[in-house]
Image: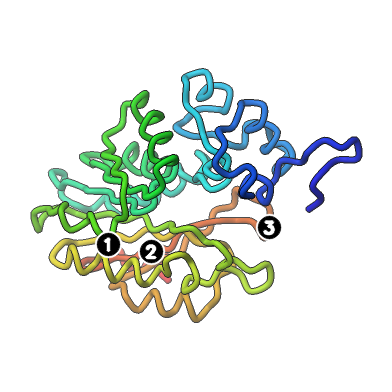
Amino acid sequence: MKARDGDGTRIYERTFLLSQEKRDQTMELWEVQKYGVDSFSDSSYVRIYGMSPAEWYERGIRLLARTTVECVRDALGELIGKDVASVLQDAPSATKFIVIDPFAGSCNSLYWILRLVGNSKGIAFEIDKSVFETTKKNLSSLDIDIELVNGDYRSLLRSYRFPVGHFIVVFVAPPWGDALNDVTGLDLRRTKPPIAEIVDYVDSVYKENPILWVTQVHQTVVANSMADLKTRFDWSALRIYDINVEGMKHGVLLGTSRWAPLDRAQGSS
């Protein structure tokens, strides 16, 4: 993608916002809106926490450049939350749900899951200090039960233990980095860290709890990497959402450990 318009104006697109020059800078409202226009022809593209950019910016909410690019926006977050709630609907009404996000970022995906799944609490880990501090300030203005922790989930997760009857929901969305190829799609073995490594570690921590895995994927996934991940689940279902143009659609692979939805056939893959 070209870096500037014909008049010399900087184009706000993914590569620029993730560059060393820009990635850790706090975005002004006009920049967030320009990114939406330049990349998606929509000034309100970066909707988070149920608000348009103008609304959340007025509330004092801020995003770093890289979080602006990498965050799960409302349109996707709400669809993910609805699918998670649908899979969990047959759980006993008194069931407590612990929703874990090892790679917090903006926490907007976690926000939507908690908003749509009753009797739930969120725990999110963010290793980057700048992202952590920005998101912590943002969450303080929202009515949502999320404990945000600054650190690596691999060194901290074992201190969070829950009774066997608690359901664990894990939103798995590590940085894709160069795992996404324009031709072959997303290789789940090349995310940072690899998806299967995350699943294996978290499962070893909660090996007595029922778990619902919610792995963010691209519409095109390297087949072998998907097949390998599915072997870890008792049940799985792939959901691709029709909210972006063809070739840029995202979705989730839902998977379970130590349980399965009552209607296993519905939406399974």
* Nearest to N terminus: mark 3 or mark 1: 3
User: At label 1, which amino acid type do we have?
Assistant: Pro
Instruction: Give neighbour class at mark 1: few <14, some 14-19, many 20+ (Cα, 10 Å).
Output: some
Disc 1 element: loop
Identify the image quadrant of residue 150. top left
Q: Estimate the x, y position of residue 189 in percent, counting from the top left.
A: 47, 74
Is residue 143 positioned above or below 9 on the image?
above
User: Residue 12: horizontal and vertical position, in percent?
Assistant: 71, 41
Q: CA distance from mark 3 to mark 1?
A: 30 Å
Disc 3 marks a residue whose amino acid type is Glu
Furthest toward the front, the residue is 21
Q: Identify residue type, mark 2.
A: Gln
Q: Which residue is mark 1?
A: 261
Instruction: Name the residue tied to disc 2.
Output: 266
Relative vertical location of residue 132 with respect to residue 90 in this rendering, above or below = above
Residue at position x 17%, y 58% from top?
158
User: Residue 27 at x, y = what percent?
Assistant: 59, 32
Front residue of this view, candidates 111 and 140: 140
As drawn, which residue projects farthest toward the right?
6
Residue contact between numbered discs 3 and 1, judged by CB atoms under 8 Å: no
Q: Which residue is mark 3?
A: 246
CA separation, marks 2 and 3?
25 Å
Mark 2 crowdedness (10 Å alpha carbons): few <14, some 14-19, many ≥20: few
Q: Seen in the image, is 51 located left or right of residue 5?
A: left
State if disc 1 and disc 2 touch (CB < 8 Å).
Answer: yes
